[in-house]
Image (cartoon, rainbow, N blue to C red):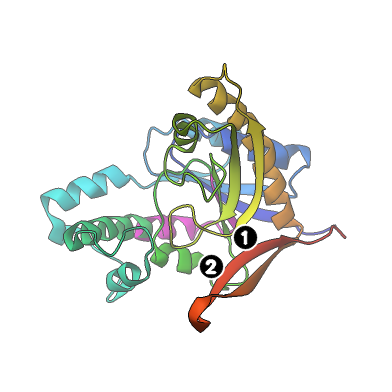
Amino acid sequence: MAKRIRIGALISGSGTNLKAIIDACRDGRIHGDLVFVGADRPEAPGFRWATENQIPTFCVDYRDIIRQYREKPEQVPVPGPGDLEASISRQQIFPATASADRVRAFFTTRLAAERQLLAKMAAYPFDLLVLAGFMRNLTPYFIDSINTDLMHPRIMNIHPALLPAFPGIDGYGDTFRYGCKVGGCTVHFVDYGEDSGPIIAQKSFVIRPADTLETIRRRGLEIEWKLYPRCVQWFAQNRLQIERVTHALSGGKRHVRTIVRLLPSS
């Protein structure tokens, strides 16, 4: 029998996708086990699913770190010399026109928090990290600490919209307010941008005239709870292959795009 993969999870809220993954591990739909659940706030309701299943938990309070930075920025340490500048130079979240002070404050607090996250995660070796409603952008410093092989990314996220449409924190809300006739969700690997990583799978649903934002969110969540475990299982089966595709652009320029191919089951 193939070795079961070790899965770590980060949450911020109720953790319903975490529960879906735990359930799928328990009933055999995922060939793996949760080895830790971390959160960015101590009162995250999703901790209950970990506690009920005897999964180790920990928290790094991002809000406390941000408060410390506002009061005494010089006392908020970043991981090491050059890490802050390197993350800022490689990030794809803020546009080039963004305030340098704002960008520096953002990445200083994030790197300080991620330094603690990585230290806590080090106690629990894992093969895949799933973001199950983790409402914090990850920096290149954190991503590169986990993705040591660019052709084998190990951070997976689920987003409540059909990417690349409506990245950000309120995908279902943005879909509804725009007046879309179709909604859905996307599972993708994480890269340096905001919800811009290589897409693994998507699932859509029709938005009916009588739908409200609440009914759209409910229907979307029901799809998420099925799609996310399926993608995690594909990872466990080693069926997700990363490829670099080069497209020719005008003027002789070329654009390299990273895609995910689903290999046939053996």
Identity of the residue drawn at 46% across and 47% down: 167
Q: In the picture shown, does residue 214 fall above or below 54?
A: above
Seen in the picture, residue 62 relative to 205 is either above or below; the reply is below
Location of mark 1 (residue) = 127
Q: Residue furthest bottom?
A: 252
Q: Is residue 109 magenta?
A: no
Q: Amino acid at mark 2?
A: Asn
Judging depth in this view, the residue of 93 and 211 nearest the camera is 211
Please say whether residue 163 is visible from this viewpoint: yes
The image quadrant that residue 155 belongs to is: bottom right
Find the residue positioned furthest to the right. Answer: 266
Q: Nearer the viewer, residue 132 or 183?
A: 183
Horizontal and vertical percent position of residue 261: 71, 62
Q: Secondary structure at mark 1?
A: loop
Q: Is residue 209 left or right of residue 135?
A: right
Q: Residue at x 31, y 46 (%)?
A: 62
Q: Position of residue 232 (x, y in %)?
A: 67, 50
Residue type at mark 1 is Asp
- Span colored in magenta: 115-131
Name which quarter of the figure residue 41 lies in. Answer: top left
Mark 2 neighbour class, 10 Å CA radius: few under 14, some 14 to 19, many 20 or more = some
Please state, as top left, top right, bottom left or bottom right, where the C terminus lies in the image. bottom right
Rate crowding at label 1 as few (under 14), some (14 to 19) or many (20 or more) other CA atoms within 10 Å. some
Which residue is identified by label 2?
147
Instruction: Count the marks.
Output: 2
**Mark in front: 2 vs 1:** 2
Is residue 81 positioned above or below 189 on the image?
A: below
Residue drawn 46% across the image and 68% down it: 145
Image side of residue 135 versus residue 217, left or right: left
Identify the mark nearer the N-term, 2 or 1: 1
